[in-house]
Amino acid sequence: MTSKLSRSASRLKIRGGCGPQHTLNSNHVRYFKELLGSASAVIDGVSKDATADLEAFNCDWMRKYRGQTKLVLKPKSTEEVSKIMKYCSTNMLAVVPQGGNTGLVGGSVPVFDEIVVSTARMNDVRSFDEVSGILVADAGCILEVVDHYLAERSYTYPLDLGAKGSCHIGGTVATNAGGLRLLRYGNLHGNILGVEVVLPDGTVVDELSTLRKNNTGYDVKQLFIGAEGTIGIITGVSILCPQRPQSVNVAYFGLESFEKVQLAFREAKRHLSEILSAFELMDCRSQDLVKIVTDKRPPLEGKHRFYCLIETSGSSKEHDNEKLERYLEFVLSEGIISDGVLAQDETQARSLWSWREGIPECLAHWGGVYKYDVSMPLPELYQLVDDTMERLSSTGLLGEGESFPVVGVVGYGHMGDSNLHLNVATRRFDKGVEGALEPFVYEWIQGRNGSISAEHGLGIAKKAFIGYSRSQKMVKMMKDIKSLYDPNGIMNPYKYI
């Protein structure tokens, strides 16, 4: 399913535009070099061969989507971004905003030869109030670096992702990333207090509010959270950060049915309530694949159909330990869980988390992975995995040996958010597998009033399928917003809607 599109975007009408995109030439490159000054701020593949340097910007980390950009720009300031966009708007040059390029739906790579505007050099913390916990930072700050900065001040970033070592905070806002602790801290629509955005025509919208309450008119910043860079480039973020927990506990246990998983989650909310920060679900196949790839010893001796990881975060270790131990005693005595282990220190906690966080990387061991990030009513969360497994088996696509394209079907995700990651590990990307999965998965979701994208976004991967989750009227409203802010259609074109 690699998006290897060889035609130049300059030969296509840009959707929503009033004319064809102009061809990138040496005069354009000269302007950008003079604007940005530093040689490291421009990767020029127009006047010379820069294929190797451009590779990381043209291809997503899954090696599934690939563009042919010839120019990457790395501005250092919002002012530079503004001048870039004003010039691109005047000259009808399409642009793709790119942060850490860790997305899973092809939203941050070019489709054709659009200019990539990278936020990698915009990486300063602008301010932090240690009383209110409000952080203002450049969009290009790496999430893990920001979290370390906050840790030194006894605070934490309210978002945690497996890609935290690479992803930019601006990119997480642009995609409304969910992550591992949404159960505790909520999503970014609630934590973001303000944004600074450069519109497609170069206009700078400075809405970097540090106020928790501001009830004066439309909350316009919400339009840019999850817009995937289609109506503007986020250059700065103001976000409310919580106090860093003084006590963190992690437990991992095995269960024999999805019904018992639901009971365990219900009891976790009842027993742990305010200290519950994560409740993650993994099926046995996902854990088997991690074991095969890493050759690590599993946390539990026996084999179980499902596994769950619970994390608690609080301010009193003694209080939190007591609550978690009472919870584990209860679910064990009631036969809800079959076995479990409680981390005794930070090293053991990290080890337990690796059985959840390591799944995506391990799945890519054999070749390609078809990833579906979906949400639906909790009681039906896992049925999609079983139904997909049956479909691929019945069509002869799943089996052992090179003649079968599919290695396995696994389900894992955020039980607390009713968010399932359905992953199909393959030996190679295969049109037959794709045809068996799409639109089957989306029709299945639609039939249960679910969402075809719980947290990964739409990008190019799901653009054509938005109708399975949104009405025609809603899609039209989104297109109207796109046309209003980006009448020339130059901002991250061919994606989203």
Image (cartoon, rainbow, N blue to C red):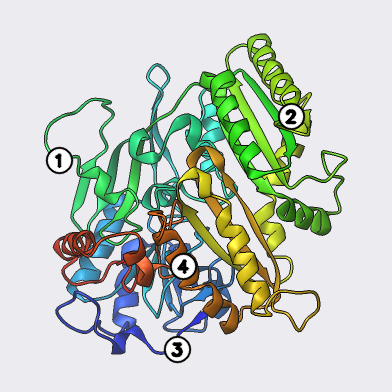
Residue at 28% across, 64% down: 84
Residue 341, given in percent of the width and then of the height, sits at: 79, 30
Quadrant where the image shows the C terminus: bottom left
Q: For residue 106, which numbered disc appears in the image?
A: 4
Q: Is residue 150 above or below residue 27?
A: above
Q: Amino acid at mark 2?
A: Gly
Q: For residue 218, which numbered disc appears in the image?
A: 1
Relative to 176, 473 lies left or right: left
| Dot in front, 2 or 3 | 2
Which of disc 3 and disc 1 is earlier in sequence?
Answer: 3
| Dot in front, 1 or 3 | 1
Q: For residue 267, which numbered disc appears in the image?
A: none
**Where does label 3 land, which residue?**
6
- Spatial CA distance of label 2 from label 1 is 51 Å
Q: Is residue 66 above or below residue 425?
A: below
Residue at 37% across, 19% down: 132
Which of disc 1 and disc 2 is earlier in sequence?
Answer: 1
Q: Is residue 234 above or below residue 312?
A: below
Q: Amino acid at mark 3?
A: Ser
The one of 365 and 108 positioned closer to us in this rendering:
365
Residue 6, given in percent of the width and then of the height, sits at: 45, 89
The 10 Å Cα crowd at callout 4, few under 14, some 14 to 19, many 20 or more, is: many
**Where does label 2 land, which residue?**
335
